Image (cartoon, rainbow, N blue to C red):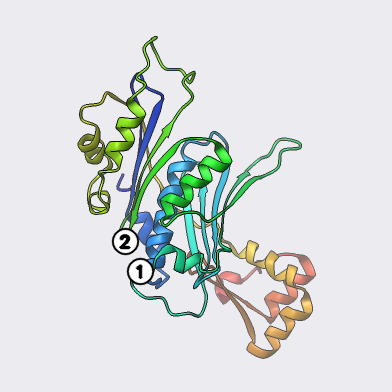
């Protein structure tokens, strides 16, 4: 298990923690994209945060994290399934982006940036709808934005330390739990939250990127009594398909798709997440609109 998310509880205290490190899956998410360094760093921090938050949600579905910007970065999207299958992408404007651009300049230049988290259940019960929380961008880092979101939308004390570069996306999450949340025994360590967050503040970006989750937990909390809860495996999965792309083309309408065929002879759609290309020629398009199918009988020979 190269990519790992480690969950633990502070024994006798209403505090839980998580550490995540992703290199293989993070590399797969960015393999087909040449993002500027500040964009890669920001998107990687969102990827780490999405894994940390999704692992605590008891539902079957997708956590979708979106950052809508009004600067050079127009949109960052991370999708994380309940089993930590993940994908991510960024949409940029035409402005050049330097090597060391702060978050506010990237996504909140005019103060109109927004951050949203959507919970989209896979098999919703009758009457159940996806949940979405939206907040303005507050703070100078991705961790600041997320902590503000958790205070406003979840009323849950949360601390995050996030880091990402070209090779690794990593993060630490601490949350203060309701004291009636099943702590064994009658004595509750009231100071554990202060100690946990104070020690977390000493964690340097370089350490978070270089060290394994178990080593970080030991370095920070060797004097604490931690109860390991689970070790999970985040991974990159893109659920794009020819069928999905076909439905998207049908939604555009026959006239628009035919105009593209007339000009280019084929319609080529590239997945923003994984870079895979889907090619439809005139025969494919005719069958698509005639039958609603997105695959032809001899597709494997012609594509």
Q: What is the x, y in percent for residue 133? A: 61, 47
Question: Residues under labels 2 and 1: Cα distance?
Answer: 7 Å
Q: Residue at x 47, y 42 (%)?
A: 53
| Front residue of this view, candidates 221 and 240 | 221
Which residue is most to the top? Answer: 186
Count of labels in the image: 2
**Residue at mark 1:** 37
Can the viewer see residue 235 in this picture? no
| Front residue of this view, candidates 57 and 113 | 113
Can the viewer see residue 290 in this picture? yes
Q: What is the x, y in percent for residue 43? A: 43, 60
Q: Which of the labelled discs sits on residue 79, or is there none?
A: none
Q: Residues within 10 Å of mark 2 (few under 14, many from 20)?
A: some
Q: Residue at x 52, y 56 (%)?
A: 137
| Front residue of this view, candidates 179 and 256 | 179
Q: Secondary structure at mark 1?
A: helix
Closer to the chain start, of discs 2 and 1, is: 1
Q: Are marks 2 and 1 in contact (CB under 8 Å)?
A: yes
Residue 51 drawn above or below residue 182: below
Residue 300 drawn above or below residue 238: below
Left of 101 or right of it: where is 257?
right
Left of 133 or right of it: where is 222?
left
Q: Residue at x 28, y 41 (%)?
A: 213
Quadrant occupied by the C terminus: bottom right
Q: What is the x, y in percent for residue 115? A: 55, 55
**Residue at mark 2:** 165
Residue 289 drawn above or below residue 116: below
Q: What is the x, y in percent for residue 285? A: 71, 76
Q: Residues within 10 Å of mark 1 (few under 14, many from 20)?
A: some
Q: Secondary structure at mark 2?
A: loop
Q: Residue at x 31, y 44 (%)?
A: 1
């Amino acid at each position: 298990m190269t990519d790992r998310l480690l969950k633990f509880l502070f024994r006798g205290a209403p505090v839980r923690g998580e550490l995540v490190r992703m290199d293989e899956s993070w590399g797969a998410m960015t393999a087909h994209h040449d993002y500027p360094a500040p964009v890669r760093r920001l998107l990687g921090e969102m990827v780490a945060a999405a894994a940390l938050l999704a692992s605590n949600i008891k539902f079957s579905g997708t956590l979708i994290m979106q950052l809508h910007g009004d600067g050079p970065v127009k949109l960052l999207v991370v999708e994380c399934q309940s089993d930590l299958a993940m994908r991510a992408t960024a949409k940029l404007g035409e402005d050049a982006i330097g090597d060391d651009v702060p978050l506010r300049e990237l996504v909140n230049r005019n103060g109109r940036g927004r951050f949203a988290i959507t919970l989209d259940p896979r098999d919703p019960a009758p009457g159940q709808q996806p949940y979405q929380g939206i907040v303005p961008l507050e703070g100078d880092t991705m961790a600041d934005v997320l902590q503000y979101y958790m205070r406003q939308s979840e009323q849950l004390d949360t601390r995050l330390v996030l880091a990402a570069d070209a090779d690794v996306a990593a993060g630490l999450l601490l949350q203060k739990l309701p004291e009636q949340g099943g702590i064994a025994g009658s004595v509750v360590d009231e100071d554990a939250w202060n100690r946990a967050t104070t020690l977390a503040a000493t964690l340097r970006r370089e350490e978070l990127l270089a060290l394994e989750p178990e080593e970080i937990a030991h370095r920070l909390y060797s004097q604490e009594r931690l109860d390991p809860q689970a070790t999970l495996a985040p991974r990159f999965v893109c659920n794009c398909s020819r069928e999905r792309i076909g439905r998207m083309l049908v939604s555009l309408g026959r006239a628009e798709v035919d105009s593209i065929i007339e000009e280019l002879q084929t319609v080529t759609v590239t997945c923003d997440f994984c870079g895979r290309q889907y090619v439809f020629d005139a025969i494919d398009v005719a069958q698509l609109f005639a039958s609603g199918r997105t695959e032809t009988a001899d597709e494997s020979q012609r594509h």
